[in-house]
Image: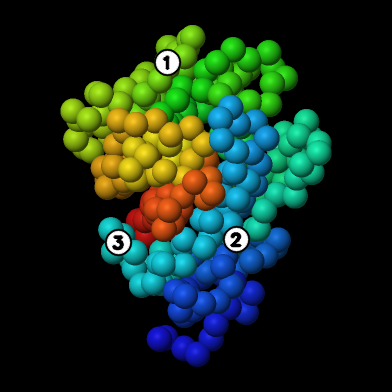
Amino acid sequence: MASQDIDNAFMTTALTGAASDPTYAGALSFMRRKFTKKVDGADVVIWGIPFDSSVSNRPGTRFGPQALRAASAIFDNDPQYPFSADLFDKMAVVDYGDCLLDYGRPWEVVERVEKEAAAILDSGAFLLSMGGDHFVTWPLLKVHAERHGPLALVQFDAHQDTWEDDGERIDHGTFVARAVNEGIIDPDTSIQIGIRSHAPDDFDINIIHGDELEEMNADEVAKAITSRVGRRPIYLTFDIDCLDPAFAPGTGTPVAGGPGSAKMLSILRRLGHLDIRGADLVEVAPAYDHAQITAIAGATVLMYMLGLQAEKMHE
């Protein structure tokens, strides 16, 4: 053990460096990062959005951020596989806690998320968000597009989320349609990976369906993503139901026939050269999980997203 310190989440005075908490004890921030609302000097801000009032099937993703933080304790603070460098050697990362949402006023969610996300982005930090259901990606996309213009969406998901939207729905299955209709994302440079369901419209977004994904290796998928997005600023969203329920049972709308976690992590590992401006991991519903299978998969996806950012700092 590096030192006798514990509870790095609120005891540390630094935003870099590994923690020394045992995996089974200590305050549960994401990967033991400092809990703080002060983001000056942070390269990455991790933020939870515990919202699940827009689900079409099983609720429970409001508990996702808690579960992801707990699952991240398994990371032992050494350089994380497959990244050769300590993620927090040069990269300053904080856990901003969760967005405060009134469960009785779901119509205020967009405004609340936008306001808080905007303040974080104004600091210059990269925002890595934890859902919550997939509706939370809508206000996150809006805030990022305000700064970077129309974005290429790279979406790992079993669902297209392009169901009909009237601009007012609070629905995790319509946010992509709304983003296209309002010019937030550019469908001609956007791509969805792992789709295993039908929707009324694909808006000309490129799709790698589940059966196609099964026949492709990780390098082929990464090249398809790169070819599609080009040099456009990217928003990366990962719905945990992209994974087969064998690897992610704890989610609201599981769809059989999906990929395993190893393959999807291998694809993510190959995306570090892309111009990723923001990212999220959504739809972890721990009430349907077993032995933290889904939460560990989700926490690992988030760790890979951090790893890609850390490698940019080591270039």
Q: Position of residue 285 (x, y in %)?
A: 53, 45
Separation of residues labelled 1 and 2 (CA atoms): 36 Å
Q: Secondary structure at mark 3?
A: loop
**Residue 271 in sight:** no
Q: Which residue is tagged 2?
A: 95
Residue at the disc numbered 1: 198
Residue 45 position by quadrant: bottom right
State the colouring used for the structure image.
rainbow
Residue 145 is left or right of residue 242, and the answer is right
Amino acid type, residue under disc 3 in the picture? Tyr
Q: Counting residues from the N terminus, which is met first, the one under dot 3 or under dot 2? A: 3
Type of residue at label 1?
A: His
In the picture, the disc for residue 81 is 3
Q: Secondary structure at mark 2?
A: strand
For residue 5, above or below residue 265? below
Q: Classify the position of the C terminus by image quarter.
A: bottom left
